[in-house]
Image (cartoon, rainbow, N blue to C red):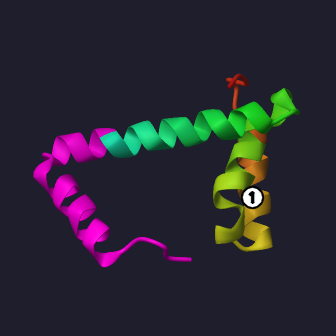
Amino acid sequence: MKDTSKKMERIYNDMLMRKTPEERVKMCFSMLGTARRIVLSTITDKKNWRKEMFLRFYGDEFTPSQKEKILSTLENFSINRP
């Protein structure tokens, strides 16, 4: 769905391009942090939060065998806190 007018798209793009590369990277990390917090708030199985995060963000990007290998690796991480 695209409901943004061409004019507003140009205004937004111009605004972003006026920012320095560092400012744009900071914006990206901020958005990623927000998305992470939102997803974490919906995970009920806190013991397996890494696996849940992986599946929610990247679950459709890998074959079933690749996912299984990644999930197995995540299971062995020593730090187990969100």
Q: Quadrant of the C terminus?
A: top right
Q: Is residue 73 magenta?
A: no
Residue 46, above or below 42: above
Above or below, 61 against 29 in this view is below
For residue 60, side relative to residue 37 (left or right) = right
Residue 27 shown left or right of residue 16 in the figure: right
The residue range painted magenta reads 1-26
Query: Between 13 and 62, which is closer to the camera in this rendering?
Result: 13
Residue nearest the viewer, comparing 43 with 54:
43
Task: Tell me, yes or no, whether the highlighted magenta stretch contains residue 13.
Answer: yes
- At x 71%, y 53%, the residue is 56
The answer to which quarter of the image holds residue 30 is: top left
Residue name at image x 71 percent, y 62 percent: 59
Q: Secondary structure at mark 1?
A: helix
Closer to us: 42 or 45: 42
Image coordinates for residue 65, horizontal then vertical, percent: 78, 69
Which residue does the image show at 79% across and 71% down from the upper left? Answer: 64
Residue under label 1:
69
Residue 57 as seen in the image, left or right of residue 64: left
| Amino acid found under the numbered disc labelled 1 | Lys
Q: Residue at x 70, y 69 (%)?
A: 60
Residue 76 seen in the current view: no
